[in-house]
Amino acid sequence: GPHLIIVPTSCLVNWESEIKRFCPGFKVLTYYGSAKRRKELRVGWTKSNWNHIVVTSYQLAVQDAFAFRRKKWYYLILDE
């Protein structure tokens, strides 16, 4: 990892719960919320053991592209 999963906003909670169900040992971050909250979620992104998977929406991936570009992702998964 880390892996980035970009999904429709309506699927965020479902993806998070499915990952936690099938991969309980993975650290999952659901990247969503106000600008202030998202800034708090980005704290520690440079640490190697930070999170295994980040799930976010298309809207936020575009809106916060500056932050996502700075991180080297192992896999990028796009949900319809």
Image (cartoon, helix red, strand yellow):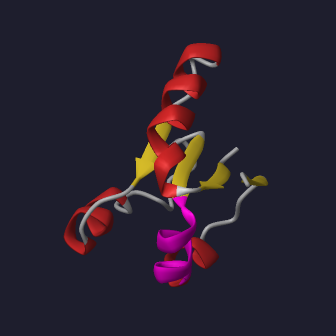
Residue 66 belongs to the span the image colors magenta: no
Q: Is residue 77 left or right of residue 12?
A: right
**Rendered location of residue 53, percent (x, y):** 59, 42
Residue lying at 60% horizontally and 39% vertically, measured from the top left: 52
Q: Nearer the viewer, residue 17 or 23?
A: 17
Residue lying at 48% horizontally and 56% vertically, measured from the top left: 9
Quadrant, the C terminus: bottom right
Compared to residue 66, the image places residue 45 above or below, namely above
Quadrant, the N terminus: top right
**Rendered location of residue 8, percent (x, y):** 57, 56
Compared to residue 29, the image places residue 22 above or below, namely above
Q: Is residue 46 left or right of residue 44?
A: right
Residue lying at 57% horizontally and 18% vertically, measured from the top left: 25
Q: Main secondary structure of the magenta part?
A: helix
**Rendered location of residue 20, percent (x, y):** 53, 22
Whether residue 50 is visible: no
Whether residue 24 is visible: yes
Q: Nearer the viewer, residue 3 or 32?
A: 32
The magenta stretch is 57-65
Compared to residue 14, the image places residue 21 above or below, namely above
Residue lying at 61% horizontally and 54% vertically, measured from the top left: 7
**Rendered location of residue 57, percent (x, y):** 52, 61
